[in-house]
Image (cartoon, helix red, strand yellow):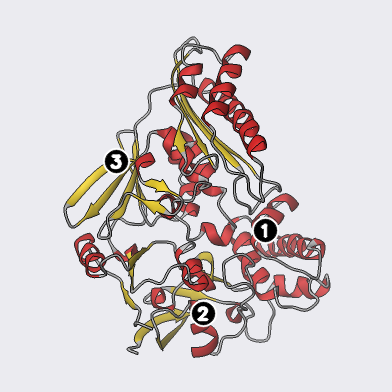
């Protein structure tokens, strides 16, 4: 068995070089809650582990002009403790904080959840709805892409072998904006989403929705934005007709598989229900800010 | 195989060990440092039997590489009692019979201590959610939850008196 190497670079450039040297077999390490499990099961057999946590800025949240920059190795517990982030993006934080136990929250990161590319990743629909972007660094330099362009299929990403996510960005928000994330699991805690729905919206002074983004998880090979669902509630005050249209758009966009956690029909139905409920929560939260 | 030399702090004492890159912190604690209080239940971060603190955060030691411990501050169950005096949580676990086989107990105690450091007066619901990552197949959790709430009350009283 080839020897595993462990490196903990102090700069992003060093990390890129270490990943490039691994030629596809080196893996970046942030919280490790997916990578170590995959190594133990034999699913991941990396030649090198590149621990990103010693790179300055990788752990922590910076706020500038109402926007947030979240270092890629920032664990969930720090998101939940950041009062300004929770106030601005309650849906993103609740999505992230739903993942695993207290122990997992001490390690698991948004960027790791994104790059693990599970269709059921709880933080990803909320980030997509939020319009989050991620800064990716690699041998060819830096690029910034919407988070929905990272996962390309279950366990697959658009990142090159020498690239890793440096940070996640959440944009500054207009007044009367809020988001929410809901998932369905068969119990109250510690499970993987059967369906997840994130909704992010902005109201005008009269309570009419002026912008909305809706994203679904666990009903397709990747979490995805559903533009029709967002469009269904823009211009409304989230009355019953708007909720019905949102529900229908979410159901129409759902392309789930059947597995031990849920059938196709069940997931489609629940996609509509959760989109509806998450929209109501986001609407109430946004209204409370006027 | 080339070993990594790791220098760290365990329960406020300096510690060093040699490790393979793939060795977990849990295995290093148990096999290199002889601290066998943290247990391997599942090895995949589901059961919490290996709960330890790293830089003041509750984590599963099975999901941390030993090499990551370089320069960090590790706290384990072995640091909980002060000499011969049990921590109030340990005492209340005994009084409430909050353990049977004891395999999950070190992890539950470390996790409960982390909860009370953050929230000295948790509700039953808060205790249950915080400890959701610590599986116990003996007690049914009820005695554990009661012991934690009782220990919290005692610790608050001691703090008020001092």
Q: Residue at x 32, y 49 (%)?
A: A158
Compute the Cα span from label 3 to label 2.
Answer: 43 Å
Residue, disc 1: B132
Residue, disc 3: A145
Q: Residues within 10 Å of mark 2 (few under 14, many from 20)?
A: some
Compute the Cα span from label 1 to label 2.
Answer: 25 Å
Q: Does the CB distance between marks 1 and 3 fall below 8 Å?
A: no
Q: Does the CB distance between marks 3 and 2 fall below 8 Å?
A: no
* Residue A96 appears in the picture as rendered: yes
B75 on left or right of A85:
right
Q: At which x and y percent is residue A34?
A: 48, 62
Chain hosting mark 1: B
Residue, disc 2: B11
Q: Secondary structure at mark 1?
A: helix
Compute the Cα span from label 1 to label 3.
Answer: 35 Å
Of the numbered discs 1 and 2, the one sitting upstream in the chain is 2
Q: Secondary structure at mark 2?
A: loop
Q: Secondary structure at mark 3?
A: strand
């Amino acid at each position: 068995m080839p020897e595993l190497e462990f490196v903990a670079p102090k700069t992003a450039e060093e990390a890129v070089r270490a990943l490039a040297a691994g030629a596809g077999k080196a893996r970046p390490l942030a919280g490790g809650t997916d990578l170590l499990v995959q190594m133990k099961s034999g699913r991941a057999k990396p030649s090198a582990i590149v621990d990103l946590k010693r790179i300055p800025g990788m752990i922590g949240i910076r706020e500038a002009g109402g926007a947030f920059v979240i270092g890629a190795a920032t664990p969930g517990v720090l998101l939940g403790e950041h009062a300004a982030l929770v106030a601005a993006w309650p849906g993103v934080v609740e999505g992230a904080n739903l993942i695993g136990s207290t122990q997992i929250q001490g390690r698991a990161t948004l960027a790791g959840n994104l790059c693990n590319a599970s269709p059921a990743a709880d933080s990803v629909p909320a980030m997509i709805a939020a319009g989050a972007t991620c800064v990716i660094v690699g041998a060819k330099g830096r690029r910034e892409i919407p988070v929905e362009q990272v996962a390309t299929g279950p366990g697959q990403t658009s990142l090159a072998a020498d690239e890793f996510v440096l940070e996640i960005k959440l944009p500054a928000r207009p007044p009367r904006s809020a988001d929410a994330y809901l998932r369905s699991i068969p119990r109250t805690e510690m499970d993987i989403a059967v369906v997840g729905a994130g909704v992010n919206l902005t109201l005008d002074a009269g309570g009419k929705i002026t912008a909305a983004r809706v994203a679904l998880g666990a009903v397709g090979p990747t979490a995805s934005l559903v533009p029709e669902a967002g469009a269904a509630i823009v211009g409304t005050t989230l009355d019953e007709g708007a909720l019905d249209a949102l529900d229908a758009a979410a159901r129409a966009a759902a392309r789930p598989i059947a597995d031990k956690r849920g059938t196709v029909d069940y997931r489609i139905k629940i996609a509509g229900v959760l989109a509806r409920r998450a929209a109501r929560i986001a609407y109430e939260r946004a209204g409370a800010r006027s | 195989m080339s070993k990594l030399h790791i220098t760290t702090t365990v329960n406020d004492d300096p510690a060093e060990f040699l490790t393979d890159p793939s060795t977990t912190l849990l295995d290093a604690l148990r096999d290199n440092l002889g601290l066998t209080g943290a247990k391997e239940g599942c090895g995949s971060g589901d059961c919490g039997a290996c709960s330890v603190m790293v830089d003041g955060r509750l984590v599963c030691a099975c999901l941390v590489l030993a090499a990551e411990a370089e320069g960090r501050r590790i706290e384990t169950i072995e640091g909980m009692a002060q000499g011969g005096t049990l921590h109030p949580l340990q005492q209340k676990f005994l009084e409430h019979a909050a353990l049977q086989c004891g395999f999950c107990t070190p992890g539950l105690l470390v996790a409960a201590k982390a909860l009370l450091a953050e929230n000295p007066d948790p509700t039953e619901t808060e205790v249950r959610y915080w400890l959701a990552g610590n599986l116990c197949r003996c007690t049914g959790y009820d005695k554990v939850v009661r012991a934690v709430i009782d220990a919290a009350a005692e610790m608050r009283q001691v703090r008020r008196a001092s």
